[in-house]
Amino acid sequence: MFESISEKLEASLKKLKGKGLIGDEDIDAALKEVRLALLEADVNFKVVKNFSQRIREKALGRQVLDSLTPGQQVVKIVHEELCSLLGSSNARIALSPNPPTVIMMVGLHGSGKTTTSAKLARLFKKEGRRPLLVACDLQRPAAIDQLITLGTQIGIPVYSAKESKDPITVVSEAMKKAKTGAHDVMIVDTAGRLHVDDSLMAELKSIKTVLDPKETLFIADAMTGQDAVNIARQFSEQIGIDGIVLTKMDGDARGGAALSIREITQKPIKFIGIGEKIDMLEPFHPDRIASRILGMGDILSLIEQAQKSFDQKETESLRKRILEDSFTFDDLKEQLKKIRNMGPLESILSMIPGMNKIKNMQVDEQEFVKIEAIISSMTKKERTNHNILNGSRRKRIALGSGTTVAEVNRVIKQYVELKKMLKMFRGKKNLKLPRSLPF
C-alpha cells in the first residue's frame, strides 16, 4: 500500500534533508517533484495544487529558514499537511444513544459492500456488542447468500427475505427484529449498480428516509483511483454520507483515492480494507498512514496487530520455555501461525521504519506454508529433539511435506540459529524477553 508514491516522495524530500540552508529554488524544485509524484499516483489535480501551495507557504517561513535543520523541518511540514489532507485524526463510528445504531452501507456493485458489512459487524462483536446484519441487496440474490455465509462464519445473525422485492419492507421488518432481539447495532447492506443511476439513488433515498441511519458509509474500491473519488462525491451530494471505507488498499500501490477522497468530499475515511480475510479491516489513522507514506513506518499499528494475535498467557508460557531451553519446532510453528494471522507479510513489513528502503525485497508467504508442512511431517520426538534428525529422517520429512531435502535442511538450520539467538537472552542478567518473537 502506497509503495509507489512513498518511494517518489522520499526521493524528492531526501535532497532537502542533507542541506544546511535551503532557499526558494530548493523548495520549488522539491515541490515540483512532489506534485509529479502525487499526480502520477492519480491524486486529484486541485488537491495536489492546494497541498503543494500550503507546503510552500509554510516552508518559506522564517521558522524553517532560520532553523538548524531546515530540510528536516520541511519533511515535518509535509507530514503535517499529509495528516491534514487525510483527515487529521481517527474518525470513529457514532453510536446512537437509543439502540440500535443503524449503519447503512452504500456504494457501487463490486466495491466490497457485502464483505465490508460482515467485517464491520465482526469488529462490533469483538467490542462486546450484538450486531445484526441485514441483506437488503435485492438486485443480486448472490449477495444475500454471501452475507448469510459470512454471518454464519463469524457467528452473527443475518436478516434476509429472498422472496421480497421491496427493500423498504425488508428494512422495516429488520428494524423490528433488531429491537425484539436486543441488537444494539444494525448494519444494512444495500444494493449497488455498475454505475450511478437515478433508480439506484431513488431506492437508497427511500431506504435512508425509513431507516434514518446514524451513519451512512460509502464503500469505495481504492484501486479505482479518481473514479472512486468522483463517485463518492455524487453519493455525498445526492444521498448524504457520514464517512468512507476504502477497500482493497492492500492492492493499491498509488494511493490516489485515499489522498483525494477526504479533501473532495469533506467526509472522513473511517476504515480501510487491507485484505480479503474477514478480519482484515482496520480503523483509518491519518497520522500513521502519513508516516507510512513518508517511509517512517507505523509501529503503533504493528503493535496493535501483534496484540490481537499474541495472547498474554501464551506469551508468558513461551517465555518460560525459552528460559528453560525447551523451545521446540511446535513452538516455532505456532509462532509462524500467529504472524500469518496478523495479515499479509508485506503489509506487516511496511509498518517497520526503513523496510521500504530495501530494494527488490521479495516476500514469499508460501515459505511459511512450506515450513509448517515440514514441521507437520516430523514425528513428536523429532519436533522436540532436532539432534536425532539424521539423513534418512530428513528424506522422509521432505517426502511427506512435498519439499526437498535442501529445504528441510534450511528449516532445521534456521531453527538451530534461532535457538542460539534465544540462548543469548537467557545468558544476560536482568534482560527482559520481548513479548513476541520476531520470526
Image (cartoon, helix red, strand yellow):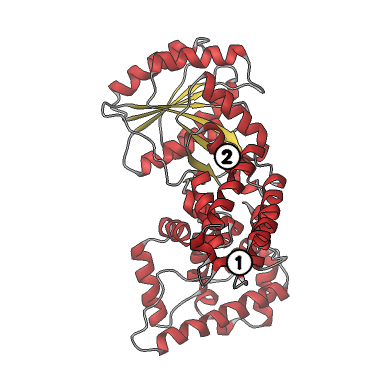
SS class of the residue under badge 2? strand
Query: Tag 2: residue type?
Result: Thr
Quarter of the image that includes the C terminus = bottom right
Q: Which mark is residue 247?
A: 2
**Real-space CA distance between mark 1 and mark 2, rounded to the nearest whole angstrom:** 24 Å
Question: Who is closer to the viewer here, 38 or 164?
Answer: 38
Q: Along the horizontal axis of the image, is 341 left or right of 174? A: right
**Residue that carries the numbered disc 1 in the rendered image:** 355
In this rendering, the answer to whether 274 lies above or below 217 is: below
Q: Along the horizontal axis of the image, is 285 left or right of 107? A: left
Q: Position of residue 285 (x, y in %)?
A: 46, 49
Question: Who is closer to the viewer here, 44 or 228?
Answer: 44
SS class of the residue under badge 1? helix
Query: Tag 1: residue type?
Result: Met
Q: Position of residue 54 (x, y in %)?
A: 55, 48
Kindly report which numbered mark, 1 or 2, lies closer to the viewer in this rendering.
Answer: 1
Q: Position of residue 151 (x, y in %)?
A: 46, 33
Q: Residues within 10 Å of mark 1 (few under 14, many from 20)?
A: some
Question: Who is closer to the viewer here, 317 or 403?
Answer: 317
- Quadrant assignment, res 367: bottom right
Q: Residue at x 39, y 23 (%)?
A: 213
Q: Residue at x 55, y 55 (%)?
A: 78
Q: Along the horizontal axis of the image, is 35 left or right of 53? A: right
Q: Residue at x 55, y 24 (%)?
A: 235
Which is nearer the N-term, disc 1 or disc 2?
Answer: 2
Q: Residue furthest left?
A: 97
